[in-house]
Image (cartoon, rainbow, N blue to C red):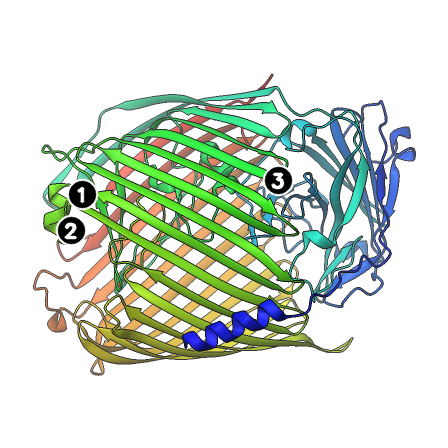
Amino acid sequence: MKQLLMILLLLAVIAQAKAATDDGMSVISIPKIDAKIMVDGRLDEPFWQKATKVEYRYETQPSRNVAPKVKTVAYVAENGDSLLVAIKAYDPNPELIQASYKKRDQIFGEDTVGFKVDTFNDERKAYNFFVNPLGIQSDSIEDDVLLREDSSWDAIWYSAGHFDDDGYTVEIELPFKILRFPNTSGQKTWGIDFMRFYPRDVQYRLAYSPNDRDLSCVLCQIAKAEGLDDIVSGNNLEITPYVSAEQGEFRSPPAQTEWRGEGVNYNAGADLRWGVTDNSVLNATINPDFSQVETDAAQLEVNNRFSLFFSEKRPFFLDGAEYFNTRYNLLHTRNIADPDYGVKYTGKNGGHSYGVLVSRDQATSFIIPGAQSSSVYTLLDSNFDDVESDVAAARYSMDVGDNSQVGFLATNRSAEGYENTVLSIDGSQKLYDAGTLRYQVMYSDSDNTDDMQQRFGLDPNTTGRGFELNYSHRDTHWNWYATHSDFDDDFRTDLGFLGVVGNTKDVVGLGYRWYGEEGDFFHEYKVSGEYKERHLTSGQKYEQQREVGFQMSGNYRSFFYFGSANRDTLYQQMWFDEEYFWMESSFRPVGSLRLGLYLETADTIDFRHDRPGHSDTYELYTEWQVNDHWSLGFYASRTNFDVNDESLFEAVISNLNTSYHFDDKSYLRLIVRYSDVDYNTAIYSDPTQVEKEIKVSRQLLYAYKWNPKTAFYLGYSDNGFEDDRVSQFEKTGRTLFTKFSYAFQL
C-alpha cells in the first residue's frame, strides 16, 4: 500500500507541466464615474452609458466553452465608494424565469446572475456575489487552495432586480468597505469573472471567462480587471448591538410535572467590526448571541459511535473565519459555546495572511477522540457547574509561487487543572496544472483533570502528533488521489472537530468522467473506485474497505449515484464483514419542485452489543417553491436495524421547514423536528431501555431583516417527548423570545 502511494507521488513530481491558456482573454477596464445611482434594477441612468460593457462569451456547463444559448451583458464601473455592476439577462421565454422570495444564500437552483472578484489577484481566494431576478442576495468566500466555498459569510451590500419583456435586469452596489484588498496607491489589478445560472432542461452555467477542466484551479483562469486607482476600504467602523428577551419554562415528567422558570430573561451584547486598513479587520464581541433563531436539524443518534457536527451561526465567529482554515478542522468555533467576550484580528499583507482570536468561554466542552469511537466531555466543578476556560488561536499563512501555500496554526484552551495546546504546519504545493500535493503536520499537548484521568484512563499529561500527506490529480476526464495519515492515540484538538485518532489511514482512489452529446438526456457520467486501510498505532489492521460507484447527471437537473462498498472491520477484538449498497438521486420534474431519494441496505455492526446486524435506510426530501412567496421543505428518514432476523430498533426522523416571505425583508417560518424510535427491549442488554421514545421540537418565527445584521425576531418554541414512563406526549420546555439588532455603520 505505502509503495503504491510513493509511486503515485513520484509520478506527480516528474509529470510534465502544461501551460495554461487564457483563450484570448482581454483585460477589463473599470472606469471611475463620479455619480450615485438608485439601486432599483433599471438601467435608465446616464451612469450605465459610461460603464464598461462586458458580454458573456461561454457556456462552461454542461458543455465545455461553447457559445452561450442566451445573451447576457454586464456593465461595471466604480464611483470611489462602491463597485457598481448591472447585468442584463436576456431570455427568449421570460415566462420560464425561475425566481422567488427566499432567505439569503438560498437562491441557487433559480435564475441567478453575479460575479466573483479576487481582490488580491493571488488566485487563491475570491468573493462571490449573486442575485436572483427579485434582488435576493447570495454571497460567499471561495478558497481555491482548500477547494472550499463558505456561504456563511454575510456582508452588507445592495441589490435590486426588475423583470423586462425580454428577460430581467439586476443592479448591484458593492461598498469597498466590505472588501479586503492590498493597501497600495495607483492602479490595481483584480481577478474577475461574470456568471449566470440559467436553469431550464439542465442547469446551464454561462460566464465571461472560459473554464479549462484540465486545470485543477478555478481562480487562475478568470479575467483581470484594472483601474480602481483611488479606492479606500480601511478605517470604517460597524457596531451591531443587540437586545433580546426570553421567557422559558421547563419541567421533567414524570418526576416533575409542574412548570418552573425564572421569569423574563433579558440579554444584551454587541459585535464590532473595524476595518483598520484596506486589508485588515478587527472584530470584537461582548456576550455574542446564540439564540434560538436558527435551529439545528434533527439527527439520528442511535448506533452512532462519533460526535455529531453542527455548524457555526454567530456573525462574530463567521467574519474572517476563512483565515483560520486548514485541511483539518482544528478551530471549530461552535466549541466556544458561551463566551463572555471575543477579540479577533485578521488580515493579509502581500502574500502573508494572519489571524488572532482570543475569548473567554463560560462553558468548556470538547471531544475525546478514539480509534473507533468518540465522546463529548464537559468540564464541571465540585458543584457540577460549568467551568470557564480561556481560548486563543493564531494563524499565519504565506503564498508560495503559483497557487501554492504554507501556513502555521496554534490553538490553546485552558482552565484550572486543564489545558490543551495544538500546533500545526500545513501547505499546498501545485506540482503541475492538474496535480497538487497537500500536507499537514500537527502536535498536541494536554493537561488532564483528575476526572478525565479516571473516566478515560488518561495520564496527567498527554502528547500526540498527527500528519497527513495527500496527492490529487484532476483533469477533464481523470481524477486520482492518494492519502496517508497518521495520528497518535493521545492527539486531541479541544478547539477543533476531530473524532478519530490512534490510527494510520491509507487511501487511493481513481475516477473517470465522460460527457454525452448535445441533445442526450444524460450529459455527464462518472465511474469511481477507492481502496482504504486503517491500522491501529500498534500496527494491527482494523479496517479494510473497497468501494465502487457510478454517477449520471442529465435533464430535469437529475442526479443518480449507485454505490457499493465492502468493509472488513475489527471491533472489540472481533472481525466483522460489512457490506453496503446504496442509491441516491434527485431531480426537478418542474422548476419549482426538487425531489430527492436515498436508499441503503447494509450488513453492519450493532455497536452497543458488539454483534453483527443489518440495517435498511430510506430517506426522502423535497423542496417545493409553491409560489413566489411560499416555500416548503421536508425531510424524512426511516431506519430498520435487525439482529439475527429480529428487529433491534426502528427509527423515524423528519424535519419540516416552511416559510412565507412577505417581501425581500420579512418572513414567517415554521420548523418542526420529529424523531420516533421503537426498541425491541427483549434483545437489548440494558434492562432500563424504553420500548418507545418520541421527541418533538417546534419553532414559529417572524423575522424582519433590513440587512444581514439589522433585524427583528419574534418567536415561540417548545419541545417534548413521549416514552414508556409517561402515558401521553409531554412538553418539557416552552419559550417565547424576541431579539433586535441594528448595524451602525460609521
User: Which residue appears at 12% of the width and 40% of the height?
Assistant: 256
Q: Position of residue 53 (x, y in %)?
A: 88, 42
Calculate the distance from the C-alpha at mark 3 to the C-alpha at mark 2: 42 Å
The residue tagged with tag 1: helix, strand or loop? loop
Mark 2 crowd level (few <14, some 14–19, many ≥20, 10 Å Cα): some
Q: Are marks 3 and 2 in contact (CB under 8 Å)?
A: no
| Label of residue 351 in the image | 3
Calculate the distance from the C-alpha at mark 2 to the C-alpha at mark 1: 7 Å
Lateral position of residue 300 relative to residue 242, left or right? left
Query: Which badge, 1 or 3, is on the more N-terminal residue?
Result: 3
**Which amino acid type is marked by label 1?**
Asn
Instruction: Please say if 417 is above or below 285.
Output: below
Lateral position of residue 110 relative to residue 452, left or right? right
| Label of residue 458 in the image | 2
Q: Give the quadrant of the C terminus.
A: top right
* Closest to the observer, 202 or 370: 370
| Label of residue 448 in the image | 1
